[in-house]
Amino acid sequence: MTKAHRKRIPDGARLQAVLLMLGVPEDLVLGSVEARLSAGLHRLGFEPGARIEWDHHPALWLRDVVDGVMVPHPNDPRFITPLGYEAHKRKTNGSGGTTAGSDKANLAKVARAEARRVHELLAPPSKPKKSKCKARPMPGSRASGVRRKMNGRAEKR
């Protein structure tokens, strides 16, 4: 007697079962990817047909590379956020008047810091500057705090 072979339950089906058990609504678990994505974006407040852009946080060019692999991975869903077109543009380029706080400003800041670090590593060590003692003021001058009279007497200013 031979035992009937059962196919392994796919990981996607297992994930859907767990999500349903956790109380995630069915329209977010079952159906086509496009339908689930549309339902999820609608629940986040995006209108149907709105232009959605996906933002990486931190930006890809600001991530560390370890052994040729970005950390965190570029497609790690924990670091990807849906944004509207205008919000993503503002996050990337900054507001119209300034780039402060934007991804491009952060990139420039990191580039400047890296350039300074490289310059400090490659520049020859500089000699420490000698400190000068403050010279004493000339007697009878305003800086001395003493006033000399024509008769030779000295008095405080």
Image (tube, rainbow, N blue to C red):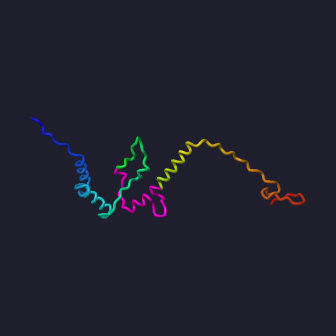
Judge left or right: residue 114 versus residue 19: right
Decide whether residue 157 is among the magenta residues. no
Q: Split into 4 quadrants, where in the image is the C terminus?
A: bottom right
Which of the 4 image quarters holds residue 3?
top left
Judge left or right: residue 4 versus residue 145: left
Check the image and report above or below for 63 versus 51: above
- Give the image location of residue 155, x and y in percent: 84, 59
Check the image and report above or below for 87 versus 131: below
- Give the image location of residue 21, x and y in percent: 24, 52
Q: Nearer the viewer, residue 43 or 104?
A: 104
Q: Residue at x 38, y 53 (%)?
A: 56
Q: Nearer the viewer, residue 96 or 144?
A: 96
Figure disc tally? 0
Numbered range of the magenta stretch: 76-104
Q: Of all residues shown, which one is farthest toward the left?
A: 1
Q: Residue at x 45, y 62 (%)?
A: 95
- Give the image location of residue 103, x and y in percent: 44, 55
Which of the 4 image quarters holds residue 150?
bottom right
Q: Split into 4 quadrants, where in the image is the N terminus?
A: top left
Check the image and report above or below for 72 versus 54: above
Check the image and report above or below for 120 versus 143: above
- Give the image location of residue 117, x and y in percent: 53, 46
Decide whether residue 95 is among the magenta residues. yes
Q: Residue at x 25, y 55 (%)?
A: 33
Q: Nearer the viewer, residue 18 or 54?
A: 54
Judge left or right: residue 108 versus residue 123: left
Q: Of all residues shown, which one is farthest toward the right?
A: 151
Q: Nearer the viewer, residue 101 or 136?
A: 101
Q: Residue at x 72, y 47 (%)?
A: 132
